[in-house]
Image (cartoon, rainbow, N blue to C red):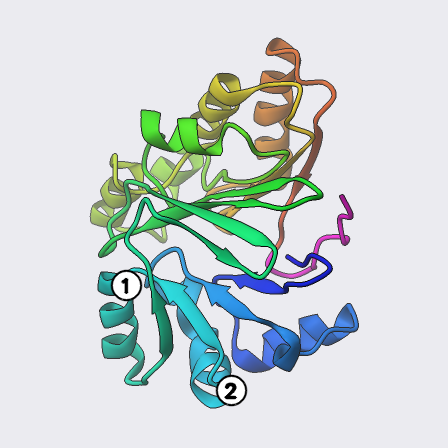
Amino acid sequence: METPETRLLIDAGFSGRQIRQRLAGIARSAESVHGILITHEHSDHISGLTGLASKLKMPVYCNRLTKEAIESQLEIQIDARIFTTGDSFTIGDVLVETFSVPHDASDPCGYLLRTVGGNVGFLTDLGHATKLALERIRPANVLLLETNHDVKMLQECPKRPWSLKQRILSRHGHLSNEGAAGVVEQIMSADLRHLYMGHLSRECNKPEIAHRVISDCLKRTGGTHVALSHASQDVPCATLTL
């Protein structure tokens, strides 16, 4: 995400090389990024920190427990800018609001980034949407929302052990398509303009299934004004300008 003054990454799950390549694809460099906001320490959110934060000394914004988990897992030292979950702070011309989410990590959080152009929300990796999370994300004009799995596909997936299925389906696991639709139903307003479905499971979801569930929800809740897209690991989304 960038404003006229500030460029930020939200998490760094790809390798440092892959992140550099994707930034180059939009004529940006890793050296021009002002910081990385980390939601939690699971590997698919921090793998690129070794090649970015450690080598470039790029600032990493996270809470203390997440910092400790990152440094222990990756065996690196990061330039951590510590916040307490629930705090708000500024990076350049961006006001960053943080809030707790229920997930099986040390101290996972979501973000609402307030800019002159609009508010961008990140609500991913959570087992259920708490009243707090819904309240904090409601002002978003653009929202990345987890639509991780189709429950039936997950239950029938032969590659996932039952213990993992239980973890994913738990209240500290991941949002299903229907769970994401429940979030949309509760936060729908005229202010929400763009909705990105994110963190789709390769084995236990399909973009067309997630799209149908969320699209039906938008129709039921008067959200036909919302542009619906899905974020893919393989192909970067088109740049959105607010």
Q: Percent position (x, y) of residue 216?
A: 62, 18
Type of the residue with mark 1: Thr
The vertical placement of 34 against 100, above or below, is: below
Q: Secondary structure at mark 1?
A: helix
Judge whether residue 123 can be spotted in this image.
Answer: yes
Crowd band around label 1 with a 10 angstrom C-alpha radius: few (<14), some (14–19), many (20+): many
Observer-nearest residue: 111 or 25? 111
First of labels 1, 2 by sequence position: 2
**Which residue appears at 22% of the width and 62% of the height?**
65
Quarter of the figure with residue 62: bottom left
Crowd band around label 2 with a 10 angstrom C-alpha radius: few (<14), some (14–19), many (20+): some
Q: For residue 75, which numbered disc appears in the image?
A: none
Observer-nearest residue: 187 or 202? 187
The vertical placement of 30 against 233, above or below, is: below
Q: Is residue 239 magenta?
A: yes
Q: Percent position (x, y) of residue 239?
A: 76, 54
- Is residue 87 toward the left or the right of residue 117 in the image? left
Quarter of the figure with residue 99: top left
Judge whether residue 13 can be spotted in this image.
Answer: no
**Which residue appears at 49% of the width and 79% of the height?**
58
Q: Percent position (x, y) of residue 128?
A: 33, 32
The C terminus, quarter of image: top right
Quarter of the figure with residue 189: top right
Q: Which residues are magenta?
A: 233-242
Type of the residue with mark 2: Leu
Q: Secondary structure at mark 2?
A: helix
Q: What kind of secondary structure does the magenta stretch mostly adopt?
A: loop
**Which residue appears at 59% of the width and 59% of the height?**
233
- Is residue 9 toward the left or the right of residue 180 in the image? right
Which residue does the numbered mark 2 point to in the structure image? 56
The N terminus, quarter of image: bottom right
Which residue does the numbered mark 1 point to in the structure image? 66
